[in-house]
Amino acid sequence: LDVFDNPVPEITVTFTVVPNPDNSAGGSFGGSSTSTGVSATDGVAVSSVQFTANSVAGLYTITASSPDLDSINLPAANANNVPDYISL
């Protein structure tokens, strides 16, 4: 969203996993800590690579950022010790 809360289409968004420093809970985008996606006409961006949670239970953050907009921190959690897939 821009400063007026309007959707911004066709911008590149970088998704970055910020693991939990206390217990390493987190995951990866195909083995990488980052992935990109381009926002659609409704302003929604989806990672181009599926996210896989690791096997460590706990809280962590996925940051969505774009050079011209404020970053957004998305809270995430691994509920148990089984890897799972999520869509962002």
Image (tube, grey):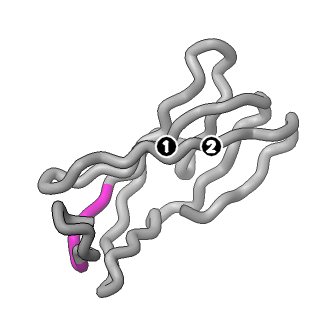
Which span of residues is magenta-colored? 9-13
The three-letter amino acid code for the residue at tag 2 is Ala
**Total labels drawn:** 2
Q: Residue at x 63, y 13 (%)?
A: 22
Whether residue 42 sits left or right of residue 77 in the image: it is left
- Mark 1 near mark 2, Cβ–Cβ under 8 Å? yes
The residue at 23%/54% (across/down) is 66
- Which residue is disc 2 drawn over? 76
Q: Is residue 4 magenta?
A: no
Check disc 1 and report the residue beneath it: 62
Name the residue located 46 percent from the left edge and 63 percent from the top edge.
47
* Image quadrant where one finds the C terminus: bottom right
Q: Main secondary structure of the magenta part?
A: loop
Q: CA distance from mark 1 to mark 2?
A: 7 Å
The 10 Å Cα crowd at callout 2, few under 14, some 14 to 19, many 20 or more, is some
Label 1 SS: strand
Question: Is the residue 23 above or below the residue 77 in the image?
Answer: above
> In the figure, is residue 87 to the left or right of 36?
right
Residue 3 place in picture, x, y as percent: 17, 61
Question: In the rendering, at what x and y percent does residue 62 appear?
Answer: 49, 43
Q: Residues within 10 Å of mark 1 (few under 14, many from 20)?
A: many
User: Hey, which residue is sitting farthest bottom in the picture?
Assistant: 41
Residue 41 figure quarter: bottom left
Say which mark, if any, is on residue 1.
Answer: none
